[in-house]
Image (cartoon, rainbow, N blue to C red):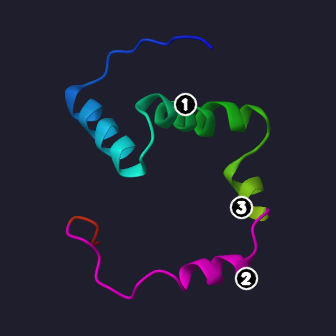
Amino acid sequence: MTTLRASIPDDLHEAVLAQAEREHISVDALISRTLRATVALPLLGLTVEKRAAQGNWQDFDRIMEQVPDAPPVPGDER
């Protein structure tokens, strides 16, 4: 493992802390996952398009059926 230090704006730091708490993971895990998705996977040839092509609509529909039919939470509406 390598330690990476970065200076980030306070509001971004607060957002990272909140996201990690919502997902019940550590800040380190959240940042590692995000960096892997944005840097490492494209270098391995795993683009969003290639990853999307591996999915199937039946699984998508099955998962979407579990989403409650409710209005978006405030701030998420378009």
* Residue in the foreground of this view, choosing between 38 and 67: 67
Q: CA distance from mark 2 to mark 1?
A: 30 Å
Q: Mark 3 or mark 2, which is nearer the start of the sequence?
A: 3
Residue found at the very far front of the displayed protein: 24
Main SS of the magenta part reads loop
Q: CA distance from mark 1 to mark 3?
A: 21 Å
| Chain part drawn in magenta | 54-74
* Residue in the foreground of this view, choosing between 73 and 25: 25
Residue 38 in percent (x, y) is at 58, 37
Disc 1 residue type (three-letter): Ser
Residue of label 2: 58
* Residue in the foreground of this view, choosing between 63 and 38: 63
Disc 2 residue type (three-letter): Gln
Q: Verify whether residue 59 appears in magenta.
A: yes
What residue sits 31% from the left and 36% below the top? Answer: 17
Disc 3 residue type (three-letter): Ala
Q: Verify whether residue 72 appears in magenta.
A: yes
Q: Mark 1 or mark 2, which is nearer the start of the sequence?
A: 1
Residue of label 1: 32
Residue 58 in percent (x, y) is at 73, 82
* Disc nearest the viewer among 2 and 3: 2
**SS at circle 3:** helix
Q: Mark 3 or mark 1, which is nearer the start of the sequence?
A: 1
* Residue in the foreground of this view, choosing between 29 and 71: 29
Q: The N terminus lies in which quarter of the figure?
A: top right
Residue 52 in percent (x, y) is at 71, 61
Quick check: marks 1 and 3 in contact, CB under 8 Å? no
Residue of label 3: 52
